[in-house]
Image (spheres, rainbow, N blue to C red):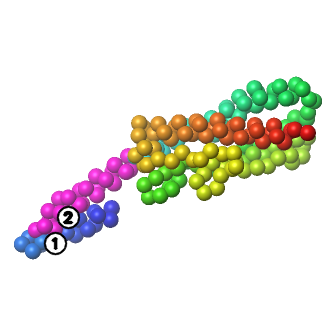
Amino acid sequence: MHFFSRGVASGVLGLAAPPMYASGLVVGGIILAPGALILSSMEQRMWERMVSALKAADFEQSLLRATKARANSELATAAQSTTADSINVELVVNAYGLASQSPDRLCFIASIDLIANRAGEHWLRERLIISTRERSPDAPPPQCASHEGMAQNEGQMVRNTAAIYAEVLAAMVIDRLRNRSKP
């Protein structure tokens, strides 16, 4: 929109004094002002596609399903071999979505808190993060792409990344529970 105001001003000068500012009329009024509006609407449509994909991903439910599935398959055998107190596990989603890495690149980030209580007492509390600046030691690097890449195919990369992050975070949760349970 920075170019829109300059384009309008140049167009007005071109209309007010055509012999002196004819190029202003052409460049400002015909190229810059409409071009800025077109680019602005294109960027808005890209953001709308990315936001729609984030909403459709339903990250919290995907994380819950992935964690339950892993817990049922991986921790069931451990529970059979030992008699253990039940563990109450709570996952708190602090943040997930797109963060700007640079003016033309976005990265998908996620942060959750794992809180586990055993026999009514605090047993484990840890923050799991996938981000560009701060990351859990076992977390993969974040998925980054251009605005266009994230918005392409109605935000397919955003939806895929959200699903992958849910699985990765679920694996990280189960690993921490399993490691904490070891004698």
Of residues 144 and 152, which is closer to you in this image? Answer: 144
Asked which secondary structure carries label 1, the reply is helix
Q: Residue at x 69, y 45 (%)?
A: 138
Query: Horizontal and vertical percent for residue 141?
Result: 59, 47
Where residue 22 sits, quadrant-wise, is bottom left
Q: What residue type is labelled 1?
A: Leu
Mark 1 vs 2, N-terminal side: 1
Q: Which residue is drawn at 28% across and 66% down?
A: 5
**Foreground disc of the pair 1, 2:** 2
Q: Is residue 119 among what the camera can see?
A: yes
Query: Horizontal and vertical percent for residue 162?
Result: 57, 39
Q: Which residue is drawn at 83% across and 25% down?
A: 77
Q: Residue at x 69, y 37 (%)?
A: 170
- How many labels were placed on the picture? 2
Which contiguous range is marked in magenta? 22-45
- Reply above or below: 95 against 81: below
Q: What residue type is labelled 2?
A: Gly
- Reply above or below: 13 against 97: below
Residue at the extreme left of the image, as rendered:
19
Asked which secondary structure carries label 2, the reply is helix
Q: Is residue 94 left or right of residue 27?
A: right
Q: Is residue 88 among what the camera can see?
A: no
Q: Distance between the residues labelled 1 and 2?
A: 9 Å
Query: Horizontal and vertical percent for residue 128?
Result: 70, 48
Instruction: Give the number of the disc on residue 28.
Output: 2
Instruction: Give the number of the disc on residue 13.
Output: 1
Q: In this view, does 80 lie to the left or right of 155?
A: right
